[in-house]
Image: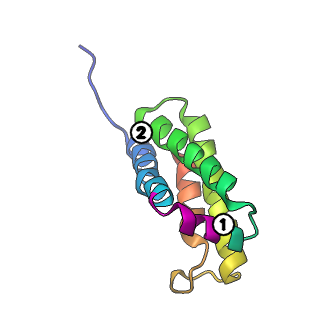
């Protein structure tokens, strides 16, 4: 029987994938509020962008957690996260501090997704 071991990169990939789950559930549960947020960032109409990001986050979560085409899954996640960073800057300005709602968290998460896929 083969030995099952997770490397630190495996754990990072799985964690990056798991973190998409509450992110996409939040968008689904607060669909109208999320739509307004997307539109405030200039992504109009907001509803198609919500549907697209939920689909991409679902692909990222499943792919990264279960190691199914992890590079493609990470790419889906990175697309969403860079879009989130863009939206944060559009709404709050180019601030780099979390207290000021800066883009550093989605950028860090996107970089972690990239690292975990290689």
* Secondary structure found at label 2: helix
Outermost residue, bottom side? 100
- Decide if residue 78 is in sight here: no
- Lateral position of residue 49 relative to residue 101, left or right: right
Q: Which residues are magenta?
A: 29-37
Q: Residue furthest front?
A: 32
Which of the labelled discs sits on residue 61, or is there none?
Answer: none
| Depicted 50 relative to depicted 117: above or below | below
Q: Is residue 19 above or below residue 97?
A: above
Figure check: 75 above or below 81: above
x 28%, y 27%: residue: 4
Q: Measured from the top left, where is residue 84 in percent x and y?
A: 63, 63
Q: Name the residue nearer the viewer: 103 or 53.
A: 53
* Type of colouring: rainbow
Question: How far apart, in angstroms, are the residues tagged by discs 2 and 1?
Answer: 27 Å
Q: Residue at x 72, y 75 (%)?
A: 90
Q: Which residue is mark 1?
A: 38
Secondary structure, magenta segment, majority class: helix
Q: Residue at x 74, y 63 (%)?
A: 43
Residue 63 at x, y percent in the picture: 49, 35
Q: Nearer the viewer, residue 84 or 116?
A: 84
> Residue 91 lies in what quarter of the image?
bottom right
Residues at marks 2 and 1 touching, judged by CB atoms closer than 8 Å? no
Return the residue nearer the eye: 66 or 49. Answer: 49
Q: Residues within 10 Å of mark 2 (few under 14, many from 20)?
A: many
Residue positioned 69% across, 74% down in the render: 40
Task: Residue at the far top: name it.
Answer: 1
**In the displayed structure image, the side of residue 73 where residue 11 appears, left or right:** left
Q: Kindly identify which residue carries mark 2.
A: 65
The secondary structure type at the circle numbered 1 is: helix
């Amino acid at each position: 029987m083969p030995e099952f071991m997770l490397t630190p990169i495996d754990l990072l990939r799985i964690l990056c994938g798991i973190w998409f789950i509450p992110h996409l559930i939040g968008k689904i549960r607060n669909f109208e509020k999320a739509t307004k947020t997307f539109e405030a960032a200039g992504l109009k109409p907001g509803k198609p962008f919500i549907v697209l990001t939920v689909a991409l986050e679902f692909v990222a979560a499943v792919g990264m957690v279960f190691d199914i085409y992890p590079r493609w899954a990470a790419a889906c996640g990175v697309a969403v996260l860079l879009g989130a960073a863009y939206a944060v800057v559009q709404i709050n300005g180019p601030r780099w501090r979390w207290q000021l709602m800066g883009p550093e968290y989605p950028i860090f998460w996107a970089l972690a997704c990239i690292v975990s896929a290689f």
